[in-house]
Image (spheres, rainbow, N blue to C red):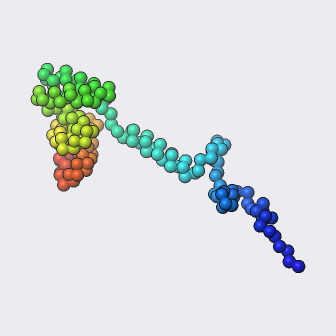
């Protein structure tokens, strides 16, 4: 006589690390975190993905230069005039305070009075880019590039002016335009 085992007798013998899901299908185990005894049931791939996203967000914050000291740079090397100094200060302060629209109005008035400072032109270009007006953004930043390089050679955005122009050209679909020559070449 033969010895027969039924399915009901085999199932309890299944390895303890295999969980049974719907319909008796096995699912991979969820392992706890290895460090610190944390027993969070986050799948390993999700933890790695979250860590990667957090790292990328941190790097993005560190890589984006700040505009906070722009008025101090203008005071040191800017194209100063009594006609527009108050407008420049108000515009830069409004932007630093988060009121971009008011800052733009002050800076546009300074531009209309004849100010062609590299920092002012750059900020106007960035404003137009944020408004998706890439034609005007490119015009202002192209005009700002040589002035930033001569007036503000150590300014953090001067070193990245070609990145700004390349981004605007890409967004405007003007990839055939040439970037201005850099003073570092």
x%, y% of residue 44? 58, 51
Give the vertical position of 23 relative to 140 (above or below): below
Give the vertical position of 125 relative to 74 (above or below): below
Name which residue lies at 24% across and 36% down: 127
Name which residue lies at 67% across and 60% down: 23
- Which is nearer the eye, 66 or 3? 3
Specify the quadrant of the image occupied by residue 128. top left
Specify the quadrant of the image occupied by residue 138. top left
The N terminus appears in which quarter of the rendering? bottom right
Whether residue 5 sits left or right of residue 181 in the image: it is right
- Seen as rendered, the residue at the extreme front is 23
Whether residue 125 sits left or right of residue 57 in the image: it is left
Give the vertical position of 136 relative to 9 (above or below): above
- Seen as rendered, the residue at the extreme bottom is 1
x%, y% of residue 124? 21, 35
**Can residue 159 be seen in the rendering of this structure?**
no
Name which residue lies at 14% across and 20% down: 82
Give the number of callouts: 0
x%, y% of residue 172? 22, 48
Whether residue 50 sits left or right of residue 64 in the image: it is right
- Seen as rendered, the residue at the extreme right is 1
Specify the quadrant of the image occupied by residue 155. top left
Name which residue lies at 18% across and 44% down: 135
Give the vertical position of 97 relative to 164 (above or below): above
- Seen as rendered, the residue at the extreme left is 114
**Can residue 131 be seen in the rendering of this structure?**
yes
- Which is nearer the eye, 91 or 102? 102
x%, y% of residue 56? 43, 45
């Amino acid at each position: 006589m033969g010895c027969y085992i039924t399915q009901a007798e085999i199932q309890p013998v299944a390895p303890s690390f295999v969980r049974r899901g719907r319909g008796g299908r096995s699912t991979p185990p969820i392992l706890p975190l290895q460090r610190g005894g944390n027993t969070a049931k986050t799948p390993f791939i999700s933890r790695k993905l979250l860590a990667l996203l957090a790292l990328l967000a941190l790097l993005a914050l560190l890589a984006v230069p700040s505009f906070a000291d722009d008025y101090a740079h203008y005071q040191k090397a800017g194209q100063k005039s009594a006609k527009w100094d108050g407008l420049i200060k108000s515009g830069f302060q409004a932007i630093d305070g988060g009121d971009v629209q008011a800052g733009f109005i002050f800076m546009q008035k300074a531009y209309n009075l004849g100010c062609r400072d590299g920092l002012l032109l750059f900020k106007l270009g960035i404003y137009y880019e944020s408004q998706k007006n890439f034609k005007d953004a490119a015009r202002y930043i192209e005009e700002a590039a040589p002035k930033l390089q001569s007036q503000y050679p150590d300014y953090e955005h001067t070193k990245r002016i070609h990145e700004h122009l390349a981004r605007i050209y890409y967004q405007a679909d003007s990839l055939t335009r040439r970037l201005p020559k850099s003073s570092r070449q």
